[in-house]
Image (cartoon, rainbow, N blue to C red):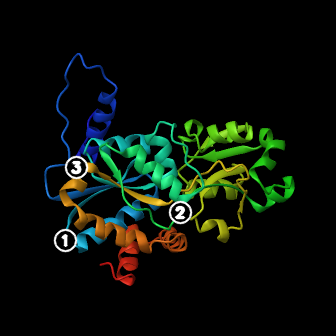
Amino acid sequence: MWCSLRTAAVRCLVVTAVVCAGCGSSRQGPAVANALGDESMTIASFDFPESELLADLYGQALTASGFEVRSMPRLGPRELVLPALAQGLVEFVPEYAGTALGFVSLGSGAPVANEVATHDALVNALAGSAMTALASAPAQNANAIVVGRDVATRYELRTISDLQRVASQLVFGGPPECPTRPLCLVGLGKTYGLAFKEFVPLDVGGPMTRQALEAGQVDVALLFTTDPSIARDDLVVLTDDRHLQPAENIVPLVNTDVLRHFGSRLVDVVDAVSSRLTTAALGDLNAQVQSGERPSAVAAKWLATEGLS
């Protein structure tokens, strides 16, 4: 494996750290560099636009408050990014409460639809670890199982349970990791008994997924509740009648050592952003990104409007 430039180099270090985490202890490998030990804040995002936007929101607010911020956009999926956060390769990641809880607890912590209960469970799951959850934002972005209006009408689909009658005839599209995710195909199988005709790996709730739905290449897809294309393209969100999806409020995760170092100075800035970030606001910001504006520019305008920059 070889990498070039700073971003690629950090990605290589992250991969090395994650791989080595599963190695035996009989032989000590080379030390892995980390981002700790300086006065900068390295903020990473997952590999989809909303995550990049959220990282820009928090990063620019911190910069405006005098922090030195380094950005690591679209670093990868959760399986790569959260181990990087725990090992100090990055120091701050905007997360989604329910999914984060399921991940860090290895499935033993059951996220629920209640926002407070899910956040409290996440805090408890991280207690004593290298990661700490700060206060959640009101903004919530849960998985949404959607179909086109024509598919909903043809098969009389209103709830996810309604798919049981026809799933074997339908093609499902979603993120490449979907077949192994408890809130995606795994959960749809266990909770609803769904087995689709075919799975098509697409992007993480992005333009490929929307285009595949529009072109009829997939019949059912996973999008997110803050996706403005749901209303714009007259897509139908199937009701999660068996409550598979938990509360997914935006919650900043911070490396615990970094939090100890910066203390309330960091928390106050982050909490100010979170407290103003609603689901409606996030949906509007996503619409601007979808229209072609850069996430960093969209973030800068919102922070200015909210008096946070």
Q: Which residue matches tag 2?
A: 140
- Where residue 211 appears, as percent x and y from the top left, is 62, 57
* Marks 1,3: beta carbons within 8 A: no
Q: How many marks?
A: 3
Badge number at residue 257: 3
Q: Where, quadrant-wise, is the N terminus in this rendering?
A: top left
**Amino acid found under the numbered disc labelled 2:** Gln
Q: Is residue 53 left or right of residue 282?
A: left
Badge number at residue 93: none
Which numbered disc, 1 or 2, marks the residue that appears first in the sequence? 1
Q: Is residue 158 left or right of residue 174?
A: right
Asked if one can make out residue 79 in the rendered structure from this viewpoint, the answer is: yes
Asked if one can make out residue 294 in the rendered structure from this viewpoint, the answer is: no
Q: Which residue matches tag 1?
A: 66
CA gap between label 1 and label 2 equals: 28 Å
Q: Nearer the viewer, residue 247 or 67?
A: 247
**Which residue is depicted at the point 65% across and 47% down?**
244
Which numbered disc, 3 or 2, marks the residue that appears first in the sequence? 2
Q: Secondary structure at mark 3?
A: helix
